[in-house]
Image (spheres, rainbow, N blue to C red):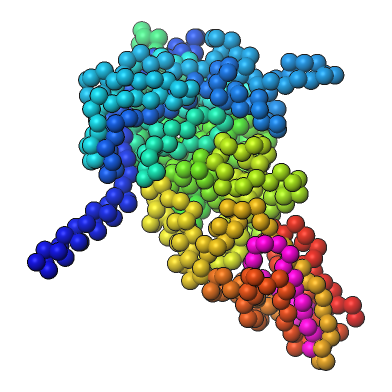
Amino acid sequence: MIKFVLSSLLTLIGSLYSFAQWQQHIDYQMDVQMDVKSFQYKGKQVAIYENHSPDTLRTVFYHLYLNAFQPKSQMDMNMRQVPDMPARFMQNVGSEESPKYESKLAHLKENEQGFIHIRTLTQNGKVAPYQVVGTILQVTLPEPILPHGKATLAMDYTAQIPTFAMRMGRNNSDGVALSLSQWYPRICAYDSQGWHPYQYIFGEFYGDWANFDVKITIDKNYLVAGTGDLQNAQQIGFGYQGIKPVKTHQKTRTWHFKAERVIDFSWAADPSFQHDVVKTKRGVELHFFYKNFPENWKKLQQIMPQVLDFYEEKVGAYPWSHYSFIQAGQGAMEYAMCTFIEGGKDPNALVKTACHELAHTWFQHIFAIDEQQYPWFDEGFTCFLQLWADAEVVRKDPVANFSDFRHKAFLKYMSENHEEDPSIRADFFERSRSYFSTAYAKGTMFASHLDYIIGRKAMERTFKRFYKEYAFTHPTPENFVRCAEKESGMQLFWFLKEFMHTTHHISYCIEKLEAKGNKTLVTLVKKGRIPMPLDIIIIPNGQKPFSVYVPTDLTFGEKPNPFINMERIVLPVWNWAENTYQFELNLPSSQVRNISIDPQEFMADPNPECHHLKSEK
């Protein structure tokens, strides 16, 4: 009996563990007929949906992203309401003297709009009832999908690519004919929190991993670039130098791509694309598709193999065979196995953008962060990796605080008094400025502050551990912080909650230095709500500088000495509830030339002038 109970308990534990680790999976088969004159296409799609969850599914949701590009869509209405919507999305319908701005979406003509119209939809051959709500397709399943079961969902649809370019569109400012992202009916993510049928309003994405088998039939003069491995290169005459003529009476070619274990599929096409290929040390192919500024794109080809090598070294292996940098879309946006990049006129901007978008491969595509729920986790850590690569690979000038410009951007945002709760969902920020400052600047500051608290070596080990334990699992910020705790030996959840779930700030001052016989009494004051461990540099007269480390009681630990050529004194902890802290230096005050808190300027303190104090004597 005991043996039976023990066996049953182990089975239950194993079952619960497997439920905690489950991920949904989809196999997409797509056949697309693209008309390059009307910018419309017909699509046939079969999705084999595997339910790895412990739940019975009676409803399935799809994203119909293209429906956002219409007058009176939720994207349109949101653009009208946000007080600081970027100018590129707005149109002046007034005069220069009395401007009146409206969303550009509100003025799209019928043949300029985007849409996906479902023509037929079945589950396992049975007609499936559905309704379209904005950019979401809600399907009522004729047969529920049981736990660990699967279903075949098939549909025919027609779609139109809009003129309005937001990550995708037609005939964009760079002259690229077709940029197709968020272009097909995509099944929404389903996880332990249920379905995630986010309307496409402005921003971010979240999806389950899938395998794609995609055939794109298009005008024979167009070169197609995007996600996946091309299956029929020889048949269509595609090589490393673009498209070669093939003897055919057909006006079209069919490009056949396959991609495994990616969260999305995107592609771009143009008859004038130039195409180059370089390889990394490990053999990953980097493809470059561009129309103009070839000298800048050639420069990019020299740098990006080193950058990918750097990301693999610091985080983990890139798991696919190739990656493509494609001149397409508006702005820049990362996709599975590729990125869309606008322009190339400024070579430095092109390199920085490419470094950023490639870094997204790990946080958006390998980890597949829920960007609606945690936009700062994806963008902030991507920025951190990008700036790290920019310092060590591009500029070859590694500095202690390579997040400096994000640091300044965050401090400027704090000073504007419009700061919003950073835990707000991406599309729900009241101001565009609040979203971008939180996701990019504050997210980067979270990563750089964590780096400061635990030390660079522990941060490197944390990235590698996070990759090993959470690749392809949709992890959360808590998962990363737990990895940091394991690698540093510190307690860190307090910092996650304070920094990314409040609008509290960090602020410290050196209040005064006082003579105390042959010693100096130093008084520090904490003026902000967020406690931090402190690195302090003392510069005496006629002696070597040394550092002082003041741990916070919340970490229950201390980081290694970051100043390897300098003696360090570790002081007793500063309890977070106490606003004043004093310690003594074994130096007369006349010998203390300078004392500085956070000399490397890691901390996002709005009053850094309080960090430095010179002796009055």
Residue 185 visible in rendering? no
Does residue 31 lie above or below 372 as drawn? above
Rendering coords of residue 590 (x, y %): 86, 84
Rendering coords of residue 109 (x, y %): 59, 10
Q: Residue furthest right?
A: 617
- Horizontally, residue 13 falls left or right of residue 330, namely left
In the rendered image, residue 243 lying in the magenta stretch gets the answer no
Q: As rendered, which of 266 and 466 lies closer to the eye?
A: 466
Q: Quadrant of the N terminus?
A: bottom left
Residue 250 visible in rendering? yes
- Horizontally, residue 331 falls left or right of residue 258, namely right
- Horizontally, residue 452 falls left or right of residue 263, namely right
Residue 58, by quadrant, is top left
User: For the point 42% across and 60% down, which residue is it?
Assistant: 465
Residue 163, by quadrant, is top right
Residue range in magenta is 519-544
In the rendered image, residue 535 lying in the magenta stretch gets the answer yes
User: For the point 54% across and 43% down, which residue is it?
Assistant: 375
Rendering coords of residue 8 (x, y %): 16, 60
Q: As rendered, which of 299 and 20 lies closer to the eye?
A: 20
Total labels: the figure holds 0
